[in-house]
Image (cartoon, helix red, strand yellow):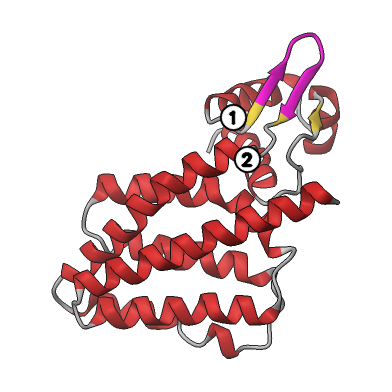
Amino acid sequence: MLLRDIIYYAIREAILTCEYRPGQELREQILAERYRVSRSPIRDSLLRLEREDLVTVMPRQGYQVRPISTSDVENLFDFHLLVEPACAAAAARVEGPASLALDQFRGFADEDKDETSFTGHNKSFHRAVAGLSGNLRMAAVALHLTEQLERLVQVSVRVFNHEQVRDSCLQHDAIIDAIQVHDAEGAGRLSYEHAAGAHARVALALQQVAAG
């Protein structure tokens, strides 16, 4: 992998996991010092991230991690509510034992893990369901959405309690059940309800963050 790609993925991951917070200023020189590279791959990376709507170029000031706006949340979830159920329903229609791989995501609700560990589990689960859909284009769109939504999950998980994490994971288990018995309608419906619940939690978390 080329150096500029390594730097791009490193900065991108830091934005998606909220290590670089929404609205935070990013300076080329500071990033170059952190990653021990020249400013050229930093600049290239930031311009790539601008095209992904993760970074905003501030004329004569530098760059800023794109803030999370209400319209961004609504637009992402409008799309998410279409794509996620479609992936789950498609995965349920796939014949054969492939869906048994989803068993690895069972039982998370009963494990003694903190709320922040839920984000990695959640992303991996949704990636796996999309990958089972059998539709490479739809899976690619779902993966991109999952990555874009990761910032929102990171924000919302800060106001999660253990019971909310448990409920979300139990919903994952129910979706797995439907996929493994090839109930496409049930898998789609459960996935939609799960996504709608995530939307509500994110909206509430952003309200609480805004209120201080």
Q: Which mark is residue 49?
A: 1
Above-or-below relation of 204 to 106: above
Percent coordinates x, y for residue 205 in the rendering? 69, 57
Q: Residue furthest top?
A: 60
Q: Residue furthest bottom?
A: 110
- In the displayed structure, would residue 132 be above or below residue 7? below
Q: Amino acid at mark 2?
A: Arg
Give the alpha-carbon distance from disc 1 to disc 2, as whole Å: 7 Å
| Three-letter amino acid code at the position of disc 1 | Leu
- Point out the stretch of residues depicted in magenta: 56-64
**Which comes sooner in the sequence, label 1 or label 2?**
2
- Tell me the tag on residue 150: none
Image marks 1 and 2: residues in contact by CB distance under 8 Å: yes
Classify residue 51 as left or right of residue 161: left
- Looking at the rendered structure, the number of numbered marks drawn on it comes to 2
Instruction: Report the residue marked by disc 2.
Output: 12
